[in-house]
Amino acid sequence: MELTPFLYGLYKLAKYAIYPYTWLVALAGLILILSWLPSSPGLTRWIRRLALTIFLLIWLLGNPVVASNLLGALEMWHPPKDPTALSRHDAIVVLAGGTAAKGTLRPTTEPTAATKERLLCGIELYTRGLAPLLVMSGGDPSVIGEGPREAEAMKQFAVRLGVPEQAIVAENQSRTTYESAVGVRRLVNPQTSLLLVTSAYHMPRANQFFAGQGFSPTPYPCGYLTRNAPGWPSEWNPFDLIPNSGAFWRNTVAISELVGSLAYIVVGKA
């Protein structure tokens, strides 16, 4: 299911509906509207309920313990692998995690920190001789106008780190993880043995889509955001119950991944 520009715009817009920050803004906006209505005991109760809901959402979504368990449930899906124990494959596929376009302060377009982390994992596997080919996957995710193609920025970064240009294939048309799987399938035979590299939290969805395209990839997750597998931390302190922005971001990542996987299951594409 490759999306037309219009449907892709709707898809990107719909993603905002699953972001917790959107929920909070919507609830706060509703409280603001209700506060302008003529006062009544029933209205006051509703405003208090909504205020309590916002408080609980902020506390839960910003809670490090909640974030560790929710994100950890994704990251434990494919356990970390020892690269020295891996067999040789035909290709290493590295999925993009975003690019930062050049501007008045940033002199050049470059991969984001998440993409660089994935690339470094893929390059390490390549330098260990685990595959003769690096496939970079990621196009231009812009909804309006044109932006950099992620795979091209990844390729330039890898070449600067010493990877031969002839050992790199850039799949630069995909805008979503599903389209990456479809795009790689156009370039690589599904019978090809792949090492699939992406962030640990992203691996369940990515592996799901590549398997749906007929591949049998070997997942190589990297960039773990959670220290331990889900469960109450063995070494915790009261500060772990205090909300913070880092935990809020990790919960947002986990919710986005879970909803993304569910959406493609519902439409029969995974």
Image (cartoon, rainbow, N blue to C red):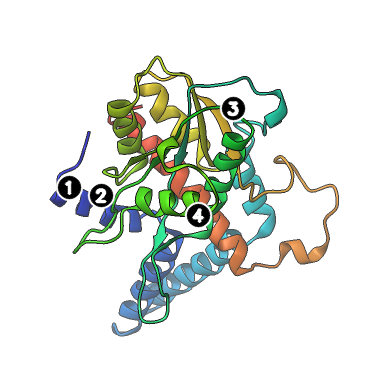
Residue drawn at point x = 27 percent, y = 27 percent: 186
Q: Is residue 206 above or below residue 100?
A: above
Q: Earlier in the sequence, mark 2 or mark 3?
A: 2
Residue drawn at point x = 64 percent, y = 33 percent: 128
Query: Mark 1 and mark 4: span between their CA atoms?
Result: 36 Å
Q: Earlier in the sequence, mark 4 or mark 2?
A: 2
Q: Earlier in the sequence, mark 4 or mark 3?
A: 3
Residue that numbered label 2 is attached to: 11
Query: Mark 2 and mark 3: span between their CA atoms?
Result: 36 Å
| Secondary element type, mark 3 | loop
Residue drawn at point x = 34 percent, y = 23 percent: 213
Q: Which dot, 4 or 2, sits closer to the camera?
A: 4
Pointer 2 with pointer 1, Cβ within 8 A: yes
Q: Which dot, 2 or 3, sits closer to the camera?
A: 3
Residue that numbered label 1 is attached to: 7
Which residue occupies the foreground of this view, 223 or 101? 101
Pointer 1 with pointer 4, Cβ within 8 A: no
Residue that numbered label 3 is attached to: 130
Which residue occupies the foreground of this view, 9 or 117? 117
Pointer 3 with pointer 1, Cβ within 8 A: no
Pointer 4 with pointer 3, Cβ within 8 A: no
Q: Is residue 137 above or below residue 44?
A: above
Q: Position of residue 101 (x, y in %)?
A: 36, 67
Residue that numbered label 4 is attached to: 160
Q: Is residue 15 left or right of residue 61?
A: left
Query: Mark 4 and mark 2: span between their CA atoms?
Result: 35 Å
Q: Which mark is residue 33?
A: none
Q: Which dot, 3 or 1, sits closer to the camera?
A: 3
Query: Mark 3 and mark 1: span between their CA atoms?
Result: 39 Å
